[in-house]
Image: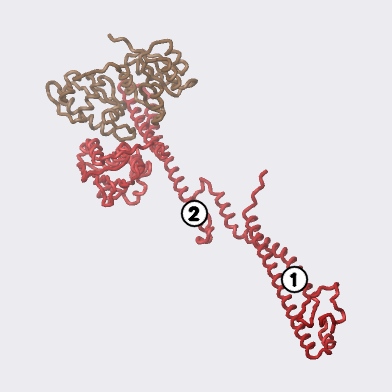
Chain colours: A brown, B red
Amino acid sequence: MRRTMRVLVVEDEKKVAKALREGLEAEHYRVRLAFSGEEGFFLVNHEAFDCVVLDLMLPQRDGLEVLTTLRKRGLQTPVLILTAKDTIDDRVRGLDSGADDYLVKPFAIPELLARIRALLRRGRPDQILKLHQDDLEMDLMTRTVVRAGQTLDLTAKEFEVLEYLLRHLGHVVSREMLTRDVWRIAARATPFDNVIDVTIARLRRKIDDPFQAKLLHTVRGVGFVLRRDRG
Amino acid sequence: MRVAVPSVRTRLTLWHAGVLALVICLFSAGTLLFVRAGLYRALDEQIERDLATIEKVYREETGDLGELDHRMGMTLFEVAEGHTVIYRTASWPPPDTKPYRMRASADAVHRISVARDETALRQTLWTLAVILAMGIPCAIGLAIAGGYLLAGRVLAPVGAMAATARRITAESLSARLPVENPRDEFGQLANVFNETLSRLDAAFEQLRRFTADASHELRTPLTGMRSIGEVALQRSLTVQEYREVVASMLEEVDRLTRLVENLLLLTRAEAGRIPLTPTVVDLCELVVSVSESLRVLAEDKDQKLTVEPLAPVTAACDASILRLGVTNLVYNAITYTPNKGVISVAATRSPAGDALIEVQDTGPGIPAAHRERIFDRFYRLDSGRSRETGGIGLGLAIARWAVEANGGRIELESEEGRGSLFRIVLPSS
């Protein structure tokens, strides 16, 4: 059994903080909440965390200021900043202050979870050559997908989407994440939701339709997840 | 201490009067000198004539000088030979009480001197000087009064314009300044004002429409969320039903998020706060890549999506922003073209050397009346249909910005019932 990861969430908006706590706890993290920069600063100095989620607009003490001070003191913990400011300048300033990653509000919880997983994984590069779930198997070297011994013919994009879903196995993947990470489109205003929906539908036709157990599920209003059929 | 700057009317009057005063003074001085010179010349000629007469009389019949004296009246004279006075009028030499003008003609033997009283001449000059000295202030006074009245009349249109302009606010931008004569300076000024007002009016109108549209678009998902939530709470539901409710609300949130993203992008773009990083972009590669990424949508509607990179075309522009524009155009074409339609995308170069990207569809086309405004934010041909297709009405506005930010323009050719052609033109230089 792996040790439970401890996450500190510094966020002054109570509702958001509570949602973050529940979202993280559902993923088996231990969560501490701080509602101000001051409190967050205190907690970081007195307890050990594996990851800090830091809102930038905080009362009393600005998030960036807290972060800068912490980094000066030699804090190594990965920090993910949440911000409503998404201009390039703001991002650069955030990352320069020592943040490991940033997420722009409004963000999707699945994406936050994925980012935190990535931060915690950091330093342990995974040289995975094969991904699989149940009887679905993906070979990253030969770029083939086999389900129940049957080779599936996927387009390049479908392959990439499936790979992304397999890498986030059991976790919901949002449309935004797919747009950015699979289609590699940074502009958030690009109309890509329909493209994703159609691609997912086609992928589902190939990997699920001929088989009894369904693997690719749509979580309405949130995104998609690859996991064993529950019902 | 600051001295208040006098009004234009006062300044005009003062300038006018000042210049006029200078002119009058110069003119008066000139007149005085001219008259003076003329009078003296006449007097001198008179004296010359006297001299000649005296000399003649003296040479021919010396004894008649007394009679001559009698005839000549006012003229005083003396005829002398060496130191001997031959004849001299009664009051010679001329008395100091009156000014006299004297002339003499002399040769080795005799000498004739003539003097004439110039009091009358001086009197004339003096009178003239007095008249001028009294006339100049009067003339200047008249000039000031007249100039003031004239300046007032000339400047009256400016006052009227100012009064009208003062009444024009953001609320009444449709009002225009009166133009009395469009060809004169004030008419031109008023026209320029009116043109500016028209542009302002259009801009405000656009802003008003945008605000109305934006609030409508923003309220729709909010209303959705609210009513879905309220209805759900009215009765108890099963877990599955609750999941549906939450999912439905999340879909509205998604819509709202997308809307806000797009609006923010446009707002920032308008404020010029999106930095561009131009590189040399292979437009063929760009159209192929955009078309391929959207191909699934066309296939889903049984549409034929063809890409024709006719010739290698490059342009200096920001690749990701131009891509956004092209994506929106192709996406738009796929969305509004019915099933089994044809969309063709091409990158080519015009004869003039401009880089072109053309997106042609076999959709319903755009009526001429809408072509101007189709790129406006939230502008839709048919709101019901667009909403079904999930558009938020900002795609073309974003496309236009993306192209214009890169120094290009979008041209639209459309034939109702036959389809539309959107052409991105990126000038070569």
Quadrant the C terminus of chain A occupies: top left
- Can the viewer see residue A171 in this picture? yes
Q: State which chain disc 1 sits on.
A: B
Relative horizontal placement of residue B20, taking residue B116 as reference (left or right): left
Amino acid type at circle 1 is Leu
Q: State which chain disc 2 sits on.
A: B
Label 2 neighbour load within 10 Å: few <14, some 14-19, many 20+: few
Residue B408 coordinates in the image, percent (x, y): 33, 45
Query: For mark 1, what is the residue?
Result: B128
- Labelled disc at residue B192: 2
Quadrant the N terminus of chain A occupies: top left
In the structure shown, which secondary structural element does the residue marked by tag 2 occupy?
helix
**Quarter residue B218 falls in:** top left
Depth check: B364 or B94 in front? B94
Q: Residue at x 76, y 81 (%)?
A: B107
Q: Which of the two labelled residues, at mark 1 and mark 2, occupies the earlier sequence position?
A: 1
